[in-house]
Image (cartoon, rainbow, N blue to C red):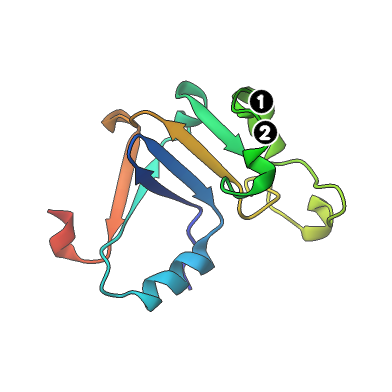
Amino acid sequence: MMNIDMIIVRTRSVYLLAFQIGDTFYYLRNQRPDLDWIVVAVDSEVLYKKDCIFCETNAGSSEMFNQSLDGRRGTQAMLKLFNDIEGKPTRSELNLSPAFTTDPQAEVLVLGNIEHKYILGYACNSNSDKN
């Protein structure tokens, strides 16, 4: 089984960085083998050098929708991705790696472009896609 730590999805001028989605990505790839895909490794500097919106849970959820964008920017907002969640098992009870967000659906939206200097590598589903 694949273990993907982060995936990026680009829609217009927003990049979505999602964590811990290996199982979901594996499932979707197998459901739609006709689709082309690419996984891009991005330098973590993007998280503090670019304009980012940090979402402790799914960015499309009503919980995130009701929070201001400004309240989801900056170091404190990024650190919230790793806080215990009230009413849920603690990070220690879940035995989470310090590198994993507490909610597996946590996301980071990167506004604007991610320049080439931040791209560390990529993987495609076929050799012809590399060109």
Alpha carbons under labels 2 and 1: distance apart: 7 Å
Q: Secondary structure at mark 2?
A: loop
Q: Secondary structure at mark 1?
A: helix
Determine crowd level at label 1: few under 14, some 14-19, many 20+ residues with C-alpha closer than 10 A.
few
Q: Nearer the viewer, residue 41 or 56?
A: 56
Is the Cβ of the residue at disc 2 closer than 8 Å to that at disc 1? yes
Provide residue 84's location: percent of width, then percent of height.
80, 45
Camera-side mark, 2 or 1: 2
Provide residue 34's location: percent of width, then percent of height.
25, 73
Q: Which residue type carries mark 2?
A: Gln
Determine crowd level at label 2: few under 14, some 14-19, many 20+ residues with C-alpha closer than 10 A.
few
Image point (27%, 68%), residue name: 35
- Say above or below: 131 vs 76: below
- Residue at far right of view: 87
Res. 46 mark: none
Determine the image quadrant of residue 67: top right
Q: Is residue 78 left or right of residue 43?
A: right
Determine the image quadrant of residue 54: top right
Q: Which residue type carries mark 1?
A: Gly
Image point (27%, 32%), residue name: 116
Image point (57%, 48%), residue name: 60
Report the residue marked by disc 1. 71
Provide residue 102's location: percent of width, then percent of height.
70, 49
Q: Nearer the viewer, residue 122 or 110?
A: 110
Q: Is residue 86 left or right of residue 68?
A: right
Provide residue 50's location: percent of width, then percent of height.
45, 24
Report the residue marked by disc 2. 67
Image point (69%, 44%), residue name: 63
